[in-house]
Amino acid sequence: MLYGSQTRIAHFLTNLAQGFQQTRLDILLFFLIVVALLLAFFLYYAAQKRRAHRELARRSREMLVHLLGKLDLNDGEARLLGRLTLYLGRGESEHDLLVNAHVFDACARKMLQSEDVSNAHIDALRLKIGFRITQPEGAPASSSALPRGSPVLLVAGAGTRLRGTIIEQRPEALLVRLGPGAPPVKDARLTLYFHNSAGVFSFRTRIMGRREDAVQLAHSTQITKHQRRMYYRRKIRLPVFVRSSSGAGVPQESVLLDLGGGGAGFQNPGGLFKKGDLIEISFSPEAGKFTLVGRVLRVSKNGSVVNVKFEFLPEAERNRILGFLSGQSERQKTRSR
């Protein structure tokens, strides 16, 4: 009986083992099934991706139509927008032209280099879209980016210099109010100078209209920078008092040698200050008293001159310094004439 049982068990195990043996055809079928499943997965993934792209494109078109409806562009502006789309980069769309000022400015620069197109038309479109200054402390891409209230200097070909203030940005022109007692401007073509914390800039323009106290000036995208420093700086001689920023010690009298929106240079009283010192600087020109804190960057000319970089300086105070320097420059030019 035991022998018969062992025979049956051995036969069962042999049949079980043979059930797991695969022929070449079985292996090929298994491989084809796996390939088919993978192919089906990739086709499904690609279809989902195309569907998502179509949905994104549909939403983008709807947003574009909505924006264009709100802008109510005339035929000329619509044609200009269509021409700007020819200069879009890879991955950029017409929708980006209406919502991204950097994309608009990049396309505008390419168009100005490649086509005979009016700066005024591009600026009018920029303003109508609603792009304003996006980096108020950087170099603007256009005169249309100058904020209201900005002080400017107008220089005519005959040497006439007039101070003014931007009071309005219009798609077709820049409105500048002239200072009190300003003489009439005879030249139609002018150079407008302005400044911010990035330096001094200018652009050529022309008078498009006049009012009793203001002029309408043509826009421009050809902005020229006149300072290599991050902030405008000029030589100046003024009495100044300096001491440690901690307030310790008696303020030392010295002479301010140069001044800018980012720092200053002055005579080192008795070789008192060295590199790395944090000091307080006080001076009182006709523009009012200034009390500034600066870090000594270097000491030059055998320790006799200190150069500092301002720290903890509010932008309102920086603008006050730049306004004072602009007034000094204008007075110097007046005296030289």
Image (cartoon, grey):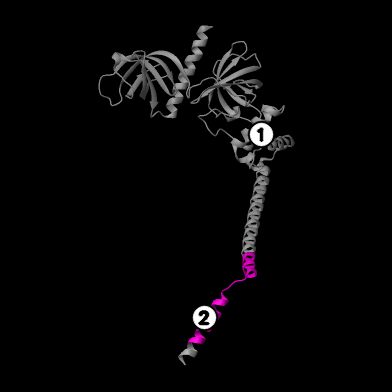
Q: Identity of the amino acid at label 1?
A: Leu
Residue under label 2: 13
Does residue 25 show up magenta in the picture? yes
Residue 207 x, y percent position in the rendering:
65, 20
Q: Residues within 10 Å of mark 1 (few under 14, many from 20)?
A: many
Residue 110 x, y percent position in the rendering:
66, 31
Q: Secondary structure at mark 1?
A: helix
- Give the residue drawn at x 62%, y 24%: 222
Placement of 31 over or under 109, stated as above or below:
below
Residue 61 x, y percent position in the rendering:
67, 48
What is the magenta range?
6-33
Q: Within the image, what quadrant is residue 107 found in?
A: top right
Residue under label 1: 125
Q: Within the image, what quadrant is residue 101 found in?
A: top right
Q: Secondary structure at mark 2?
A: helix
Is residue 286 visible to the viewer in this orientation of the structure? no
Does residue 300 show up magenta in the picture? no
What is the residue that sits farthest to the front in this orientation?
3
Residue 48 x, y percent position in the rendering:
63, 57
What is the residue that sits farthest to the left in this orientation?
249
Quadrant location of the C terminus in the rendered image: top right
Residue in front for this viewpoint, 262 or 327: 262
Residue in front for this viewpoint, 229 or 65: 229
User: Mark 1 or 2 closer to N-term?
Assistant: 2
